[in-house]
Structures are given as structure tokens and as C-alpha cells.
Amino acid sequence: MTKPKHTEFDLPRLDRRDDPRGGAIAWALLAVGVALITGTLLTVTWVVSL
């Protein structure tokens, strides 16, 4: 029988400040989240004010 090969993934870690990829992903997720929340609030405000 052959032994399974160990596969290592090089994914960014969002909880590490010294990982530039993790920091970039965290900031991108934050920006998208803020944009979605702001857009939703503006839409609701606009619809209610009609």
C-alpha cells in the first residue's frame, strides 16, 4: 500500500497582523461588509421616505 502524501496549503491567516495577505483580505471583507450595510440602510431610508 502506498502512503498518502501530506498536502500543505499556503492560505493566508486572517488573525495574523504580520501576514500582508491576511491583512489585505481582512480589510477587503470589512470594506465589502460596510458597503453592503450602508447600501441596505440607504435603500431602506429611501423606500420609507417615499
Image (cartoon, rainbow, N blue to C red):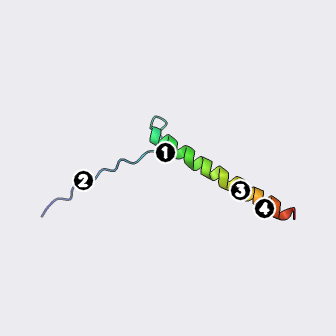
Closest to the observer, 49 or 23:
49
Determine whether 43 is above or below 35 in the image: below
Q: Which residue is mark 3?
A: 39
| Three-letter code, disc 1 | Leu
Q: Which residue is mark 1?
A: 14
**Residue lying farthest to the right in this orientation:** 50
Closest to the observer, 1 or 26:
26
What whole-number distance in Å separates the C-alpha atoms at marks 2 and 3?
45 Å
Could you say where residue 43 lies in the image, as x and y percent from the top left? 76, 60
Q: Residue at x 14, y 61 (%)?
A: 2
Which of marks 4 and 1 precedes in the sequence?
1
Q: Which residue is mark 2?
A: 6
What whole-number distance in Å separates the C-alpha atoms at marks 1 and 2?
23 Å
Mark number for residue 46? none
Q: Which residue is mark 4?
A: 44
Which of marks 3 and 2 precedes in the sequence?
2
Which of marks 2 and 4 precedes in the sequence?
2
Secondary structure, mark 2, is loop
